[in-house]
Every structure is written in structure tokens, then in C-alpha cells.
Amino acid sequence: MPFGRSAFPKGFIVPVALLAAAEAWFVVAHVRSDTLASPAAVAIAALAALRDGSLLRATGQTLLAAFGGLAIGGAIGLALGFILGLLRIVDQLLEVTIELLRPIPAVALIPLTILLFGFGYRLEMTCVAFSCAWTMLILTRSAVASVEGRLLEVADALRFNLFDKIVKIVLPAALPRVFIAFRLAVGLSLIVAVTTEIAANPIGLGYGMIIAEQTLHPEVMLAFLAWTGLLGWGINQTLLLVQRTCFGRAALVEERR
């Protein structure tokens, strides 16, 4: 995404134009449908859901599960990423295991996690943690492995132990790319959380969409869907702001790689 300020409002031109065209089509063609709703009807449904608290309640449930799973999976992936990036022998030993487990979709774990935990937050957090762990692991390993070799030679010459080497040398050098990995994992956590709710878990935004679809309220379903998109966009914009503020030009370089 461009870092220039002028790109921010321009990004709204296409979605606003599409919404206006859709609204015009509904009005001109006098569309009546049990599966679609006009943007105006969706907006009204969203306001109603905000007023009665159902949208905010579902949002809280989804974010709790998404961020809880992100914290668990992100911490595991981050730690393993540093270990594998620094210790080549460990990376080689775990390479096949990682490549066998990594392609498994998180939703494929749903039957197993239902047997283990039943429905609820633990089910959803497990699926989110599984997905986020791989994102953090792979990208952190790459970031650590790409640290300038001369910096590590300096650390060895100064006889740094592994902890000091990570804290004083590797972490500052790899942090911009690690933060990008975290940003991607945050977006993935929301995707997996909502997908799990749609597929099996009776809480959150995904479940709200399914209930609205089954009761033939497309305006409510689309309101929840649009809200989910806006939520993800808002979280990503916040993280982009943090990234630019904390890392400056380094954030721009890493983003464009």
C-alpha cells in the first residue's frame, strides 16, 4: 500500500462508486430479492444492529477469539522463527515437519478441536493460533536469517550469549520485517476467526452472518459482512500507522520488498 498521504482518500473512490452504482440499480430496476439488499438497506440494518448491541457484541466475541489465538500462535511462531533463523541445524531437523504441517488449513482442525474442546472460544482460538503460528514462524525465520552476517560476527567476537545476540543484534535488525509478519498475522487471525464461526462456532460475526442468511435477512448478513471488512481495514490502517511511526524509512523499504 502506498505511503503517500494523497493515496488515502483516493482509495475510497472505487468502493463508493460501486456502492452508488448498486444503489442506483436497486432503485431504477425496482429489485426485490431474498438474497440481495441495497446499500441503503444494508446501512439501515447496520445502524439497527449497532443500536440493539448485537453487532458490537458479536464484534467483541470475534476479536476476543482472534486476538487470543493470535497471542498464542504469534508467540509460538515468533520464538520458533528466531530459533530456526539462528540455529541452522535446528532448522534442518524441523524442515520436513514444518512443511508437512504448514499446508493443513485451519478449518480442517475444526472436527478435532470440537472433540477436544467443544464449541466456544477454545475451539476458535486453536484454529487461529495454528494459522498465525506459521505466518509468524516463516516470516520471522526469513527476517532473522537475512540479518547481516557481519553483525553476527561482531556479536561472536564480543562473546555474546544467545540471549544477548537476539536482544542486542538480531531483534533490532529484524524488527521491521517481524512487524510486517505480525501485521499479516493480525489480518489472518480475523479471517480464520470469522471462517471458524461460519463453519462451526456459534458466536461472533461469522455466526451472525449465518443466522441472518438462514432467516432470509440479506441486509443484516451484508451489514455484518461489510462491518467485518471495515473492521479489518481499520485494524490494518492502525498497524500501518504504528509501522510508519516506529520504523520510518525502514518500514517503507520492507513493505516494498
Image: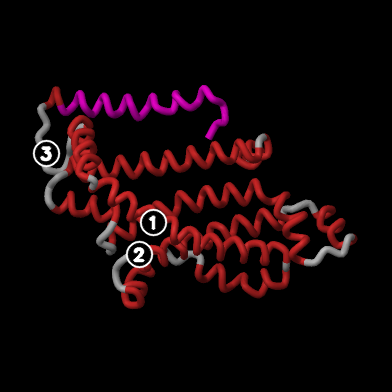
Tell me the amino acid under the disc marked 2: Tyr
Tell me the amino acid under the disc marked 3: Ser
* Coloration of the structure image: secondary structure
Marks 2 and 1: in contact by CB < 8 Å? yes
Dot 3 or dot 2, earlier in sequence:
3
Label 1: how many Cα within 10 Å (few below 14, some 14–19, many 20+): some
| The image quarter in which residue 105 lies | bottom left
The spot of residue 43 in percent (x, y) is 23, 33
Q: Which mark is residue 170?
A: none
Q: Quadrant of the C terminus?
A: top right
Instruction: Give me the C-alpha separation between circle 3 and circle 1.
Output: 34 Å
| Left or right: 127 in relation to 81 | left
- What SS does tag 1 mark? helix
The spot of residue 102 in percent (x, y) is 51, 65
| Left or right: 168 in relation to 136 | right
Residue at left 44%, top 56%?
67
| Left or right: 202 in relation to 215 | right
Q: Nearer the viewer, mark 3 or mark 1?
A: 1
Q: Main secondary structure of the magenta part?
A: helix
Q: Which residue is mark 1?
A: 64
Dot 1 or dot 2, earlier in sequence:
1
The spot of residue 86 in percent (x, y) is 72, 64
| The image quarter in which residue 17 lies | top left
Dot 3 or dot 1, earlier in sequence:
3
Tell me the amino acid under the disc marked 1: Leu
- What SS does tag 2 mark? helix
Q: Which residue is mark 2?
A: 121
Q: Nearer the viewer, mark 3 or mark 2?
A: 2
Q: Which mark is residue 33?
A: 3
Magenta segment, which residues? Answer: 1-26
Q: Magenta span has 15?
A: yes
Residue at left 19%, top 39%?
48
